[in-house]
Image: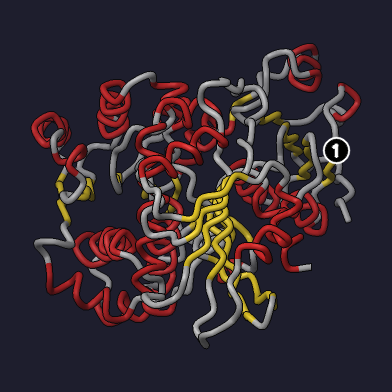
Amino acid sequence: MPKKPSPTQLSAHFIGIGGIGISALSRWFLAQNWLVSGSDLVESEITKSLRKEGVKVIIGHKKANLPHKPSMVIYNSAIKPDNPELLAAKAIGINPLSYAETIGCLTKAYKTIAVAGSHGKSTTTSLTALVLIAGGFDPNVVVGTVLKEFGNKNFHFGKTKWFVLEADEWKASFLNYHPFISVVTNIDKEHLDFYKNLASVKKTFLKFLAKNSENGFFVLNQDNKILNSLRSPITKIAQKKNIKIFWHSAKKNKIAAGKIKKIMKIPGEHNVSNALAAYTVAREILEIKEAVILKSLGSYTGAWRRMEFKGKLEIRNWKLEIFDDYAHHPTEIKATLSAFRQKYSKNKIICVYQPHQAKRLKNLFDEFVAAFNDADILIMTPIYEVAGRDKINSSYTSEKLAAAILKKYPEKQIYYLNNPKNIKSAVTKILPPATSHLSPLIIMMGAGTISEYTKLLLK
């Protein structure tokens, strides 16, 4: 139940509180004993969870949602300028802050480790945070996924001045942050609806690194070609601010990478690289004992919607294992399917993919065509349109992507499914009679509403 305010209690209202990042931030305020309220367009597992924790959550945006004289109003970056709660806050003399601006203030107050990158941020942030906790640093943590280690939350309230943060590059949000340690997992052609081209993406990542405090540290992935191509300007930034750079490489540092690969429960070369970044922060900078680091890395079994096992489905004498995964960019899709293939080398892999954002599909269409090679069967569903960011282009649809993949790889089984509610019947038709003890896997993949169809599949 929501707390009743005391006469001196500070209050914060969050517009768009159901977002993965802003919900974690609201939990920080809740942990500081602020009175917290918020609103969102739709009910979700996050809003339900926040309500149970004591947050007053209202579904729908309207002026009346704003509490009487809130101390702060914080809004999700997806909120439009004409939002009634945003306008109401300004009308009573409050200067609303964006999620990124508010996090930026916290990065100045804490000794911040900011984990950035086009892919792998959530996993690397999670691993870094858990290793630091195991090593006695007990940081505050804001991460873009839900961890069972945090009580199925995206936030950990630490008792020290350390802060581990997932630093998102969308809309250049991470330029608000002031890290002591900047981690970059990789740089790729992502969020081109905002950046327009790769040159702009690279330029903005350099600006992010330039925000690092003096006498701090960079932890960078040498195996990512685009990031490594920026070595010269990165070195200049580091020299100017007396920053020490640690370039890590799973390809070159085979001893550490080998130890990590041996104990990691989550498969995939990309996860070895993510873990190596966390290892580098902990061992090289914070001097945590290697045994502690490896034990923590080895105990990690994954996060919400990252190769997450959801249950089993019995169809035609098959017992199919169902997984849920957030991959929505061609690089992520390739890495995730490769990891599944590595772990389940003899099983058939059925990938059910929901493209996320029409502009991403258009900008990276050719890359998407080549992204599903490790799937034996691909079922494509309609594009998830992102509210306020999207408009379907008739030349670049899910159906046309399925056709393009089939044209390039005619030997593969590729299907377009107009209504995702029919996934179970579609899979039933596709599956051959059970002739082996090795059942196929179904991977429900995408960043939109695909996880809702996972629930439907398992009903």
Residue 427 x, y percent position in the rendering: 65, 62
Name the foreground residue: 178 vs 125. 125
Q: Residue at horizontal 51%, vertical 50%?
A: 414
On the image, which quarter does residue 312 sit in?
bottom right
Name the foreground residue: 70 vs 189. 189
Q: Residue at horizontal 63%, vertical 80%?
A: 319
Name the residue beneath numbered marker 1.
Answer: 59
Location of the C terminus (image quadrant): bottom right
For the question of whether residue 142 can be seen, the reply is: no
Residue 330 x, y percent position in the rendering: 39, 43
Q: Would residue 347 be found to the left or right of residue 72 on screen?
A: left
Residue 391 x, y percent position in the rendering: 61, 20
Q: Residue at horizontal 46%, vertical 53%?
A: 122
On the image, which quarter does residue 25 sit in?
top right
Q: Would residue 447 be found to the left or right of residue 193 on screen?
A: right
Q: Is residue 367 above or below residue 353?
A: above
Location of the N terminus (image quadrant): bottom right
Residue 113 x, y percent position in the rendering: 36, 50
Q: Is residue 260 above or below residue 444?
A: below
Q: Would residue 242 be found to the left or right of residue 422 on screen?
A: left
For the question of whether residue 343 can be seen, the reply is: yes
Q: Is residue 243 above or below residue 249?
A: above
Q: Residue furthest bottom?
A: 437
Q: Residue at horizontal 83%, vertical 43%?
A: 57
Q: Is residue 274 above or below residue 11?
A: below
